[in-house]
Image (spheres, coloured by chain):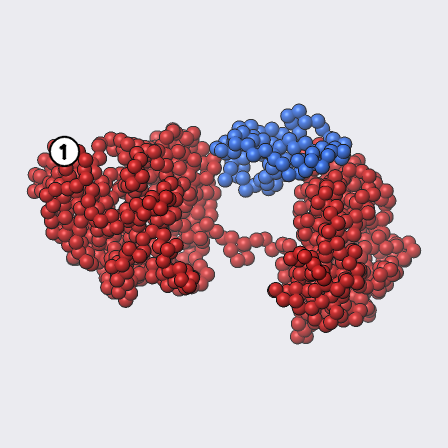
């Protein structure tokens, strides 16, 4: 059956036809095609428009380094912008579209920009389009650039991550790579071999029988990280949603040794109008011929400065392609090669170089010039050759990106005229053409004549030699500056094609030798990698672990409104019957103040210290003296960082002679345990204590309100719960519901409270029992919002809410205990540093609104006649449960000396109201409710 | 991503560890001057080359240890236990 496409070499083509669409147009390729080869076969020359000037562009390479043929695949949430057509396998029904050009890529009205290309020289956005503001023009200019369309919804595909270890990781399955892999695996080493080219050749299948060898195809090594950790992006199944397989797989491979058999990128020749569709790298044309039986054109000119293009010319000619001429910039190409091509009837133009091309939509003609001897400042004997394809070869540059990422230093060599390693790195070996670029002497690669504004050095970003000259003229002379000023090498292909000639051009412009220039920093990834591939499965519910307390289900069943508070799912409130959250909170506050409520305090941190030095060890961390703590008593303590800043707060109780139990804030449970452990292991190595976090082992329920004692008594705990026997700030280790239990009489709410700790698995039973026994008292659950309001009215500290990274104990009224404790505790020395004793520090005070305007957390405050931008801010706020008026806690400059002062309250740049400074205590000042 | 040889568990990926700043930061007595104390809190050497630092195997054995790492190449030159290198055991606070 006839293989489709006017440029398909029929006798060679094998494979069933594959239907696809390009810009809506129905086309046919054959099995094994890439989108690029299928477009070439169909004679579609123009596949995109250039970034700035909207010049027509065609396929330039056959692989990962493609700068022009970026196409849009799929649609909606599976859309892929900027896919390299040279890598996309052709599949039946594939919808491919171009990304730029209006109304179409083949007829683009925006080409008009090319006629005023001077305006868009490097750095134009710093000089033009400035009035009234660059931001007026930016969206338009971005839209014109043709970036492609982003997906319109969350990625429906799956991505996997795998970790692997091996003795040798070989990157690249060319001749050198396969040999390295075979040698290492037959020597008994565990070897991984990866290849990104979709057509690796037959020798790869021959490796199937080699032991200890894992071969990954369609896998690109994208990054080298410390200690030979290499990230590989494997393309698995692009088949669409519903597939069982992931779309891509990220491998993180730790290799004892890495072999870089990564080959080399062919470099172009630079001449005027070197960007027309039909101009392609010679090696690419050879690949299209061998893999897909494609002829690059009907009248083909090959232009080179080295030996490799001769093979291309020969093979194309032998396949029946018309090679009009072979142009070699070298004065005396090797005789053997000349003979071979001449015997095939190919005319050779030695010591000549293309100097210009013509063809508005696609290549029509190339102009050659003969290179003079000596100065090379001009050409002679210009002549035209009609052609529709121009294959260029300017030498080869080894692919050393991963070597550079690994910290390897590169230097431009005058002999190879490309970058090479300065010295070897341990555990990284370079093999094959990546190690040894050809030793031949290259000819000229840049035409000595012609308008530099029409000589492209970076096809993707439309950067010309004129841009480099401009950059140097404007004194951006370092390569890193030239890169950023011209955007040379900053595009999706990251300058893979063109780095060698670009370096020589920069050197020439600056009057230096290329070896005196450095190179820009190579950073991962080597090629663009989908975000999904980097993220893997860690999306949605798997983004972070969900932590639920043993009482989650019961609270959810009671209508709890759950939110994440510091990793835990917690009930903010329990709205009933159409209540808003705020209404629920107001009701719950009233419930606790006047009746009795139930609160899940399980996330509160609990840490046991076990050992002879347990109490002594604990005492080293708190501003409060714990050495006088007696069994049966709970002592409140504040913990500081060494800088004196408040870090956490909680209680300490003595469980036993060698056992102390600390509580921490809910969010600080992990932090405090780690802190204690750090000091124990690193500073006080001889101290005899073990730090045992037990937060998750105990469920904690706070039974809160004036009826709390009565309800607790009904559960018949093994201890006397009368006020005389068990006063406020008491602690009892006892038994409840047939289990051990720990009872704290502490109050964060300001009401009579028992914090009942029971082993986690008994939590639900305890919760249900309390609800049952409390029913006749009207008990209901309440949430975190209500609790935070209740404690605010009492002026109880909320670490991290009222305090921040600068707050020291005296700022929040704990200066006296911090100073009186004589023993050295963590942070003590810092409290007397000048900064921490300044009289104008922010201090915790209360605010009473002067009218009914609610006070908002974060609002700034200003004292009358203040010279400062701000005098503090509101840290907690709400409506008083006593009289319904707006109240707040705030940090105010020298606040304690400002009692009764009226401050202005600022929000979003406006004064919204005023408030009077009062003591930070709005409810039950004597504490009678808690002590009852 | 560093490959860190925990002296208790063997070499593991850096993601299992937490970094703890430089080693051998000596905590002065309470009688230290403001200058000495501020130096202890905030001033650290910024060494180019072998640098002793503390690491915690937080997702492993939970032990702290010391590592000498070259800050330019990230080569790990030495690993030793916490408290070694002439450090006396418990210091009274």
What residue sits 37% from the left and 60% below the top? A129
- Chain bearing tag 1 is A
Q: In which quarter of the image is the C terminus of chain B?
A: top right
Direction from residue A160 to residue A312 in the image, left or right = left
Tell me the shade of chain B: blue
Q: Which chain is red?
A: A
What is the number of callouts on the image?
1
View extreme (top): residue: B86
Q: With A634 as the anchor, is A26 left or right in this view?
A: left
- On the image, the x and y values in percent for residue A589 come to 76, 67
Instruction: Name, please, the residue furthest toward the right.
Output: A724
Q: Residue at x 76, y 56 (%)?
A: A895
| Residue B46 against residue A20 in the figure, above or below | above
Residue at point 34%, 51% (across, down): A122
Q: Can residue A8 be seen in this view?
A: no
Visible residue check, residue B4: yes
Q: Quadrant of residue A750?
A: bottom right
Residue A587 at x, y percent in the picture:
74, 70
- Kindly identify which residue carries mark 1: A332
Query: x and y percent of residue A90 in the render?
Result: 29, 56
Q: Which of A37 and A180 is in front in this view?
A: A37
Would you call the spot at circle 1 few (<14 residues within 10 Å), some (14-19), or many (20 or more)? few
Residue at the spot 67% in from the left edge and 73% down from the top edge: A579
User: In the figure, residue A201 lies in which quadrant?
Assistant: top left
**Picture quarter containing residue A614?**
top right
- SS type, badge 1: loop
Farthest bottom residue? A578
Residue A819 % position (x, y) = 80, 43
Q: With respect to residue A800, does A313 lie above or below? A: above
Q: Please tell me which residue lies in front, A151 or A182.
A: A151
Q: In this view, does A228 lie to the left or right of A892?
A: left
């Amino acid at each position: 059956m006839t293989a489709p496409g006017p440029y398909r070499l029929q006798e060679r083509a094998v494979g069933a036809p594959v239907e696809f669409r390009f810009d809506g147009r129905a086309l046919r390729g054959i099995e094994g095609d890439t989108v690029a080869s299928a477009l070439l076969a169909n004679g579609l020359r123009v596949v995109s428009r250039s970034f700035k000037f909207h010049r027509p562009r065609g396929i330039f390479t056959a692989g990962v380094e493609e700068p022009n043929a970026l196409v849009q695949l799929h649609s909606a949430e599976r859309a892929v912008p900027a896919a390299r057509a040279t890598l996309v396998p052709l599949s039946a029904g594939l919808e491919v579209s171009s990304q730029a050009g209006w109304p179409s890529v083949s007829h683009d009205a925006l080409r008009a920009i090319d006629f005023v290309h001077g305006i868009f020289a490097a750095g134009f956005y710093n000089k033009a389009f400035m009035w009234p503001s660059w931001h007026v023009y930016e969206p338009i200019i971005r839209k014109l650039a043709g970036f492609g369309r982003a997906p319109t919804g969350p990625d429906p595909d799956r991505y996997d991550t795998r970790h692997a270890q091996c003795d040798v990781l070989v990157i690249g399955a060319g001749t050198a790579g396969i040999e390295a892999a075979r040698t290492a695996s037959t020597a008994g080493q565990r070897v991984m071999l990866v290849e990104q080219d979709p057509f690796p050749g037959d020798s790869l299948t021959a490796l199937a029988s080699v032991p200890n060898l894992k071969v990954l195809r369609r896998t690109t090594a994208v990054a080298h990280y410390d200690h030979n950790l290499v990230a590989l992006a494997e393309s698995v199944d692009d088949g669409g949603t519903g597939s069982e397989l992931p779309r891509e797989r990220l491998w993180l491979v730790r290799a004892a040794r890495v072999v870089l058999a990564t080959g080399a990128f062919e470099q172009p020749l630079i001449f005027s109008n070197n960007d027309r569709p039909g101009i392609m790298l010679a090696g690419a044309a050879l690949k299209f011929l061998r893999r897909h039986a494609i002829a690059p054109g009907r009248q083909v000119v090959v232009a080179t400065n080295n030996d490799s293009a001769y093979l291309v010319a020969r093979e194309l000619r032998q396949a029946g392609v018309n090679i009009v001429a072979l142009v070699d910039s070298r004065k005396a190409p090797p005789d053997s090669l000349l003979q071979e091509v001449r015997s095939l009837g190919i005319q050779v133009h030695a010591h000549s170089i293309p100097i210009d091309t013509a063809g508005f939509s696609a290549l029509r003609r190339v102009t050659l010039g003969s290179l003079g001897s000596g100065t090379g400042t001009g050409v002679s004997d210009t002549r035209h050759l009609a052609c529709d394809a121009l294959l260029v070869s300017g030498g080869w540059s080894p692919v050393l990106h991963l070597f550079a990422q690994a910290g390897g230093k590169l230097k431009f060599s005058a002999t190879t005229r490309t970058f090479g390693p300065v010295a070897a790195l341990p555990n990284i070996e370079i093999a094959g053409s990546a190690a040894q670029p050809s030793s031949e002497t290259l000819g000229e690669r840049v035409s000595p004549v012609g308008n530099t504004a029409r000589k492209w050095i970076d096809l993707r970003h439309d950067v010309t030699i004129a841009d480099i000259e401009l950059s140097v003229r404007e004194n951006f002379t370092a390569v890193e500056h030239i890169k950023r000023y011209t955007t040379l090498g900053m595009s999706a292909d990251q300058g893979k094609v063109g780095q060698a000639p670009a370096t020589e051009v920069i050197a020439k412009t600056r009057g230096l030798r290329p070896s005196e220039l450095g190179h820009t920093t190579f950073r991962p990834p080597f090629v663009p990698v989908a975000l999904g591939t980097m993220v893997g499965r860690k999306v949605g519910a798997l983004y972070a672990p969900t932590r639920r307390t043993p009482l989650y289900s019961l609270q959810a069943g009671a209508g709890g409104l759950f939110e994440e508070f510091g990793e835990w799912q917690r009930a903010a409130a329990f709205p009933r019957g159409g209540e808003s959250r705020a209404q629920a909170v107001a009701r719950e506050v009233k419930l606790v103040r006047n009746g009795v409520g139930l609160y899940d305090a399980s996330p509160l941190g609990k840490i046991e210290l076990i050992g002879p030095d347990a109490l002594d060890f604990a005492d080293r961390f708190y501003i409060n003296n714990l050495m006088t703590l007696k069994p049966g008593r709970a002592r409140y303590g504040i913990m500081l960082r060494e800088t004196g800043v408040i870090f956490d707060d909680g209680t300490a109780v003595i469980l036993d002679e060698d056992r102390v139990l600390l509580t921490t804030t809910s969010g600080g449970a992990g932090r405090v345990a780690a802190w204690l452990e750090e000091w124990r292991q690193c500073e006080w190595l001889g101290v005899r204590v073990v730090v045992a976090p037990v937060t998750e082992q105990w469920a904690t329920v706070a039974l809160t309100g004036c009826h709390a004692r009565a309800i607790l008594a009904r559960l018949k705990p093994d201890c006397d719960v009368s006020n005389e026997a068990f006063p406020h700030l008491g602690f009892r280790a006892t038994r409840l519901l047939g289990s051990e239990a720990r009872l704290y009489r502490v109050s964060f709410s300001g009401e009579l409270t028992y914090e009942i700790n029971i082993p986690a698995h008994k939590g639900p039973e305890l919760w249900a029992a309390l609800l049952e026994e409390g029913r006749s008292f009207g008990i209901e659950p309440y949430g975190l919002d209500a609790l935070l309001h209740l404690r605010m009215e009492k002026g109880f500290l909320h670490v991290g809410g009222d305090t921040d990274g600068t707050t020291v104990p005296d700022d929040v009224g704990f200066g006296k205990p911090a100073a009186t404790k004589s023993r050295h505790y963590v942070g003590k020395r810092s409290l007397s540093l000048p900064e921490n004793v300044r009289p104008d520090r922010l201090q915790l005070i209360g605010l009473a609104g002067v009218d009914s305007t609610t006070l908002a957390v974060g609002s700034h405050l200003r004292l009358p006649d203040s010279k400062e931008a701000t005098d503090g801010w509101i840290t907690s706020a709400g409506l008083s449960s006593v009289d319904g008026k707006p109240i707040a806690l705030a940090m105010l400059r020298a606040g304690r000396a400002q009692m009764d002062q009226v401050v202005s309250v600022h929000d979003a740049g406006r004064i919204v109201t005023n408030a009077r400074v009062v003591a930070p205590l709005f409810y039950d000042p004597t504490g009678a409710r808690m002590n009852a | 991503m560093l490959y860190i040889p925990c002296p208790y568990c063997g070499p593991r990926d850096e993601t299992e560890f937490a970094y703890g700043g430089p080693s051998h930061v000596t905590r002065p007595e309470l009688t230290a001057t403001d200058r000495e104390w501020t130096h202890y809190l905030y001033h650290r050497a910024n060494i180019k080359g072998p640098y002793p630092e503390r690491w915690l195997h937080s997702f492993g054995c939970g032990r702290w240890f010391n590592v000498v790492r070259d800050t330019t190449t990230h080569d790990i030159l030495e690993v030793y236990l916490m408290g070694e290198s002439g450090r006396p055991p418990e210091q009274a606070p």
